[in-house]
Image (cartoon, grey):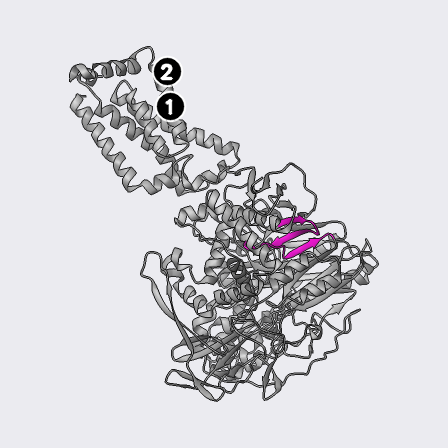
């Protein structure tokens, strides 16, 4: 090779190198071995010593990646917690804040613009700011401030998590308002919604379906039933009167329904008094059914300071343990599902609405939404006296939600972690406003348990008469207003049910909640059948609790674990006989499937290796669709409007809903059962599913669309109606997001994934398989090993 | 001019083919490896160093590839030690991209510097 030719080769190589460095510099910066941003957190345990402006704290991570934090005072403690949560979950925290803040599009582009418009118009940030104004000068506010400082200390001094580097952006400064926004998000998911708009839409488009949405589902599995030991409730409030509406709000509902709190969310908790347990002291179990994703929605911590020693889980972005146990009491929650959102329509004239004897102009502000890779968008945010105004296709509705005013639940949780007794628990819950939650608590050293569905329940009035809230109100006439409610300001209890008047139980033998209605007659309007779950899980909880308590054997922690793992479906038990009774109506191949799957001797266990569970589960989806689709589709109502499964079960065999309007003959239940089974056969053949696990598997994905961050998919048992809960809701997976069983001397728990959100951490997904297979691990106050991070008082 | 460059040429001949050639090569790999741990430009630096001590252009291809492979193996070993190797391999496109960067960048740098410094005497090799 001549020298010139070699120089030519060298020049070509140089050219390619320069091109790679200039054109692909970002990729070199991202993926170069050792120095690539993508690997910045691999093995980066960080400094062993961190300055803390509030005092001394020490952190030891246990074998599950759970930080045990001990501090000289609570501000020092929560500074450390902020640092640790940022270390382990910063991207998740930032994403939640952005979602509620209406700033997702700044990093995600046009795809999230509709979400940002909705969240900006609803004013969640302004409500969080109102809450902060109420808290900022309190000791609690100081803890939130310390937490924010800890988050920011991490952001300023340590490498950002992988997700930020992949998406090439940096988080803004963390603030107490950001923490309160994270709380807003879970509150909205659990109690925000548009059920009244949905109901009004159905009443208008398909009035004959009104009976499918009764005020109460016809069952006797409420949380409080007088025939259970120690359970009775005498309402002290005045009952509410009825009423309905046919307001034209369908366009508004169609525009916002995707942002409603997830209807599929639910939870289980139960507790048994010490009178019935092996140890003579109470036992408690809780498994909230929330979004299942990578990393999990919960972050587990053990927090210790003078007068505080608590262990459990909280939401990343919020410093406190929300569910768990301290040395004296343990507690868990499920969602009440109370209707705490109302809607108001008005008489309009030239852009003004009529209210309180005069025409008023809505307040109006313009806001700019940042859009990554696109042009920023300017929107107008308008509000009436009742709250934010949602407008679509000429329809206008104002929204009132108990979460759109200053709240105290962050303070309530803070107090709860300090509770030394069940009386302290009760006092703490007086401050718990939104979302209304079924709190179950146990005295670890005593024998008693408690049940409080804590929250603020608005009382709606028309002409001084208390009325139900399942309607769209005439805002111009001042109907249905909540006295004392000030959107984006401070509200009082004036127009809400007094805390003592909320149904509750003190020292029952046992109690179980699974999102069923609280009690048949609470004395005030809590919600309608749309707000509460079908009673299958609730009935199963009580069936098992009563079996245990009525047996000669005292109840143990193992019994409560078995209950959480229970895959027996009372829904399947109710529907399967309908299938077996209709085999004569089925085509030969459908009847053969019923025979092959052995539905006749099925034990109704929704387990992965069951063919019967697969056939039933797919069949009931087709059965529901074939029952309602003809009428609903024809009236522009999709499957999201279909009634509760319990309602479907209760339909008589000759119900007109079984008649297919598209045929000349009159179908009955057996005909639809048979057709549904025929469609099931076709589907199973097409998909190649043989057992339940082929269809029913975990699909826990990371919000950032990079597949390696997702958890692996595996078959899993359970269903929407079993205590071992797993369901697909609106394209997302929902299920037991934290399982905990707490006794007097020990507790166990498990999360679906791992405690760390750091992809390279050994604790990114180390609990996933144990969670899937129903295993537990200790939730202990003790920890072995030395200090991993020491927070030293700044200046020392 | 030629006289001015003579010491450089002399030095290059020593480190390329003299008795210190192996030492020079090992030093180049070490310096490049250390630099790569801090910035991706270290891959280029390492490539330049192993390229400049390569006796021929063809040889610079080999030394560049070898250096890149050494960086990759060292990185993998580090991830094994910190328990992140399997997560790294599972990163799909990012994993392949990092391998490509490790191997190609130093090789291009090595060939570029060796080719551009080729002289008549070394041309026939």
Percent x, y for residue A94? 48, 54
As drawn, which residue projects farthest toward the right? A552
Q: Is residue A786 magenta?
A: no
Mark 1 — on which chain does it sit? B
Horizontal side of residue A231 vs A173, given as left or right: right
Residue bearing mark 2: B23
Which image quadrant is residue B125 in? top left
Q: Is residue A314 magenta?
A: yes
Q: Which residues are magenta?
A: A301-327
Residue shown at 41% from the left, 47% from the top: A166
Which of the two residues, A720 or A704, is positioned nearer the viewer here? A704
Residue bearing mark 1: B29
Which image quadrant is residue A334 in? bottom right
Relative height, residue A60 to residue A692 (above, below): above
As drawn, which residue projects farthest toward the top? B19
Horizontal side of residue A705 vs A448, given as left or right: left
């Amino acid at each position: 090779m001549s020298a010139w030719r070699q120089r030519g080769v060298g020049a070509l190589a140089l050219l390619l190198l320069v091109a790679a460095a200039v054109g692909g510099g970002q990729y070199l910066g991202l993926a170069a071995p050792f120095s690539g941003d993508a690997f910045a957190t691999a093995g980066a345990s960080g400094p062993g010593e961190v300055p803390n402006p509030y005092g001394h704290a020490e952190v030891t991570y246990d074998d599950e990646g759970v930080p045990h934090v001990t501090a000289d005072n609570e501000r020092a403690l929560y500074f450390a917690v902020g640092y640790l949560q940022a270390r382990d979950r910063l991207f998740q925290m930032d994403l939640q804040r952005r979602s509620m803040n209406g700033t997702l599009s700044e990093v995600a582009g046009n795809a999230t613009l509709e979400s940002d418009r909705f969240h900006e118009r609803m004013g969640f940030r302004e409500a969080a700011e109102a809450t902060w104004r109420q808290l900022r000068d309190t000791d609690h506010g100081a803890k939130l401030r310390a937490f924010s400082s800890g988050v920011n200390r991490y952001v300023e001094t340590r490498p950002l998590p992988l997700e930020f580097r992949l998406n090439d952006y940096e988080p803004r400064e963390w603030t107490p308002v950001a923490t309160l926004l994270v709380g807003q998000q879970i509150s909205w998911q659990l109690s925000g919604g548009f059920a009244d708009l949905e109901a009004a839409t159905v009443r208008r488009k398909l009035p004959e379906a009104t009976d499918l949405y009764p005020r109460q589902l016809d069952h006797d599995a409420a949380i409080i039933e007088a025939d259970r030991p120690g359970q009775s409730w005498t309402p002290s409030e005045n009952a509410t009167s009825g009423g309905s509406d046919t307001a034209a709000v369908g366009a508004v509902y169609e525009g916002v329904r995707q942002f409603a709190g997830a209807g599929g969310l639910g939870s289980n908790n139960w507790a048994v008094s010490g009178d019935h347990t092996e140890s003579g002291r109470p036992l408690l179990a809780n498994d909230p059914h929330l979004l299942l994703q990578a990393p999990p929605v919960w972050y587990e911590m053990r927090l210790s300071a003078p007068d505080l020693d608590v262990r459990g889980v909280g939401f990343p972005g919020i410093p406190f343990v929300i569910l768990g146990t301290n040395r004296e009491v343990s507690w868990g929650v499920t969602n009440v599902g109370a209707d705490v959102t109302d809607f108001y329509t008005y008489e309009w004239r030239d852009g003004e609405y009529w209210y309180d004897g005069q025409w008023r102009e809505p307040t109006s502000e313009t806001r700019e939404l940042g859009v990554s890779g696109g042009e920023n968008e300017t929107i107008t945010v308008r509000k009436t006296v009742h709250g934010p105004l949602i407008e679509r296709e000429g329809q206008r509705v104002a929204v009132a939600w108990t979460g759109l005013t200053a709240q105290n639940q962050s303070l309530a949780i803070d107090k709860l972690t300090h509770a030394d007794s069940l009386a302290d628990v009760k006092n703490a819950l007086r401050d718990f406003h939104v979302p209304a939650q079924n709190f179950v608590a146990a005295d670890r050293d005593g024998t008693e348990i408690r049940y409080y569905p804590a929250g603020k329940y608005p009382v709606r009035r028309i002409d001084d008469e208390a009325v139900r809230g399942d309607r769209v109100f005439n805002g111009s006439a001042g109907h249905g207003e909540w006295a004392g409610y000030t959107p984006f300001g401070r509200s009082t209890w004036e127009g809400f049910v007094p805390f003592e008047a909320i149904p509750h139980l003190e020292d029952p033998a046992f109690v179980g909640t699974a999102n069923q209605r609280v009690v048949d007659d609470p004395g005030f309007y809590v919600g309608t059948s749309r707000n509460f779950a079908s009673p299958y899980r609730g009935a199963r909880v009580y069936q098992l609790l009563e079996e245990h308590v009525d047996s000669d054997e005292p109840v143990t922690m193992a019994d409560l674990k078995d209950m959480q793992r229970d895959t027996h479906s009372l829904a399947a038990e109710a529907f399967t006989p309908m299938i077996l009774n209709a085999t004569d109506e089925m085509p030969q191949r459908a009847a053969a499937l019923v025979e092959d799957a052995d539905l006749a001797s099925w034990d109704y266990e929704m387990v992965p290796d069951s063919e019967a569970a697969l056939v039933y589960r797919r069949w009931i989806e087709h059965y529901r669709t074939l029952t309602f689709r003809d009428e609903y589709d024809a009236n522009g109502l999709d499957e999201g409007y279909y009634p509760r499964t319990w309602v479907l079960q209760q339909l008589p065999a000759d119900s007109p809903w079984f008649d297919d309007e598209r045929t000349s003959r009159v179908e009955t239940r057996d005909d639809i059962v048979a057709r549904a089974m025929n469609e099931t056969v076709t589907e199973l053949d097409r998909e190649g599913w043989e057992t339940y696990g082929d269809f029913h598997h975990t699909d826990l994905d990371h919000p950032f669309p990079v597949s390696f961050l997702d958890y692996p998919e595996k078959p899993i048992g359970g269903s929407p109606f079993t205590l071992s809960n797993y369901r697909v809701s609106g394209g997302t997976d929902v299920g037991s997001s934290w399982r905990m069983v707490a006794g007097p001397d020990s507790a166990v728990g498990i999360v679906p994934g791992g405690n760390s959100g750091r992809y390279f951490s050994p604790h990114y997904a180390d609990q996933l398989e144990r969670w899937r297979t129903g295993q537990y691990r200790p939730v202990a106050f003790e920890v072995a090993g030395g200090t991993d991070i020491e927070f030293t008082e700044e200046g020392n | 001019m030629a006289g001015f460059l003579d010491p450089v040429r002399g030095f290059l001949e020593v480190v390329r083919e003299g008795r210190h050639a192996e030492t020079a090569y090992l030093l180049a790999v070490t310096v490049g490896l250390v630099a790569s741990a801090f910035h991706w430009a270290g891959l280029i630096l390492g490539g330049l160093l192993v390229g400049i001590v390569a006796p021929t252009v063809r040889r610079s291809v080999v030394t560049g590839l070898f250096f890149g492979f050494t960086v990759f193996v060292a990185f993998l070993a580090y991830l094994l030690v910190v328990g992140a190797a399997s997560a790294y391999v599972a990163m799909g496109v990012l994993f392949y991209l990092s391998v490509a960067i490790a191997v190609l960048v130093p090789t291009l740098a090595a060939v570029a510097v060796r080719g551009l410094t080729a002289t008549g005497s070394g041309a026939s090799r």
